[in-house]
Image: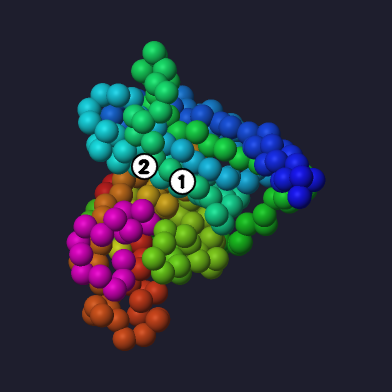
């Protein structure tokens, strides 16, 4: 029994030591990482492609009340997690995402309290670079639509769909994002609004549609598209393609979508 306990403690110590940490900082009362932290995070992701995210902990300074700071630190944690996923960093299926608010040992320097800590392990076997799906067929069609479009025109991003109840893209959506990125890079005057939609719920302010739009926004941002050219908006279930409640799984998949609106071209 004693030997079993000893082995268990050694395993816990080894696992804890095996985890490493990267910290992302935020400006006062802001839930998106500041520019210097985004640059450092991009560098970290480039250098740690074999990382596996185990924990994402959000924090806030002591300004304001703790309830507000809990929600602020949760949004900060979500922002970082979305960036990691958009870049393709592996996330443990049991990843722990936790908001501490101001309830932790505060540093005297308030700027160090507005942060998210990423705990990760490194896979000994470096994952090969994923082969990007060929976006050419989608990119050509979309590029032609953009050339003929006017300000205010809207397009559904065909095959950019999500697993139900999540902001996780279905596998077939990857070439669509690659194609959209290519079009944005080849058309430097193009500005778009990314509009998120959900199925099964008529609530206009459903947070999931915002998270889906942010997934696309973050993908474009981390791949070099300036944020002055992209924005996002939450539509919830207020503009379904198929009437809610949907009759089939196909209708649900179609309703949980992302559209873009041309803002400038």
Please state the horizontal and vertical placement of residue 22, each as a whole percent of the image.
56, 31
The colour scheme of the drawn protein is: rainbow
Along the line of sight, the residue nearer the viewer: 81 or 42: 81
Counting labels gives: 2
Residue toward you, 240 or 261:
240
In the displayed structure image, the side of residue 215 where residue 7 appears, left or right? right
Q: Which residue is mark 1?
A: 97
The residue furthest top is: 108
Residue 67, numbered label = none
Q: Position of residue 123 (x, y in %)?
A: 72, 45
Spatial CA distance of label 1 from label 2 is 8 Å
Residue 228 appearing in the image: no
Residue that extends furthest to the bottom in the rendered view of this protein = 247
Q: Residues within 10 Å of mark 2 (few under 14, many from 20)?
A: many
- Residue 100 seen in render: yes
In the rendered image, residue 235, in percent from the top left (x then y), is placed at: 24, 60
Q: Which mark is residue 74?
A: 2
Residue depicted at x 29% and y 81%: 246
Q: Secondary structure at mark 1?
A: strand
Which comes before the other along the chain, label 1 or label 2?
2
Q: Is residue 138 above or below residue 100?
A: below
Instruction: Residue at 37% x, 50% y: name it.
Output: 214
The answer to whether the residue labelled 1 contacts the one labelled 2, judged by CB atoms less than 8 Å apart, is yes
Q: What span is colored magenta in the figure?
A: 198-213
Compared across the picture, whether 179 is left or right of 238 comes to right
Can you say whether 181 is above or below 242 in the image?
above
- Residue 54 lies in quadrant: top right
Q: Is residue 117 left or right of residue 233?
A: right
Picture quadrant where residue 16 is located: top right
């Amino acid at each position: 029994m004693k030997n079993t306990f000893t082995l268990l403690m050694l395993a816990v110590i080894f696992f804890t030591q095996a985890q490493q940490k990267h910290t992302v900082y935020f400006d006062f009362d802001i839930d998106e990482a500041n520019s210097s932290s985004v640059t450092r995070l991009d560098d970290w992701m480039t250098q740690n492609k074999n990382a596996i995210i185990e924990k994402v902990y959000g924090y806030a300074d002591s300004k304001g009340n703790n309830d507000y700071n809990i929600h602020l630190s949760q949004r900060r944690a979500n922002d970082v997690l979305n960036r990691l996923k958009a870049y393709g960093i592996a996330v443990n299926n049991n990843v722990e995402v936790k908001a501490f608010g101001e309830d932790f040992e505060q540093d005297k320097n308030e700027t160090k309290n507005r942060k998210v800590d990423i705990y990760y392990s490194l896979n000994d076997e470096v994952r090969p670079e994923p082969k990007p799906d060929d976006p050419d067929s989608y990119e050509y069609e979309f590029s032609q639509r953009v050339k003929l479009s006017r300000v205010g025109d809207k397009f559904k991003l065909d095959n950019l769909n999500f697993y139900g109840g999540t902001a996780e893209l279905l596998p077939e959506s990857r070439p669509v994002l690659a194609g959209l990125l290519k079009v944005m890079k080849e058309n430097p005057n193009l500005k778009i609004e990314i509009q998120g939609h959900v199925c099964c719920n008529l609530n206009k302010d459903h947070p999931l549609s915002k998270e889906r739009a942010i997934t696309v926004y973050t993908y474009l941002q981390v791949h070099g598209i300036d944020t002055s050219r992209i924005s996002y908006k939450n539509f919830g279930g207020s503009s379904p393609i198929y009437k809610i409640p949907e009759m089939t799984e196909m209708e649900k998949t179609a309703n949980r979508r992302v559209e873009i609106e041309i803002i400038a071209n």
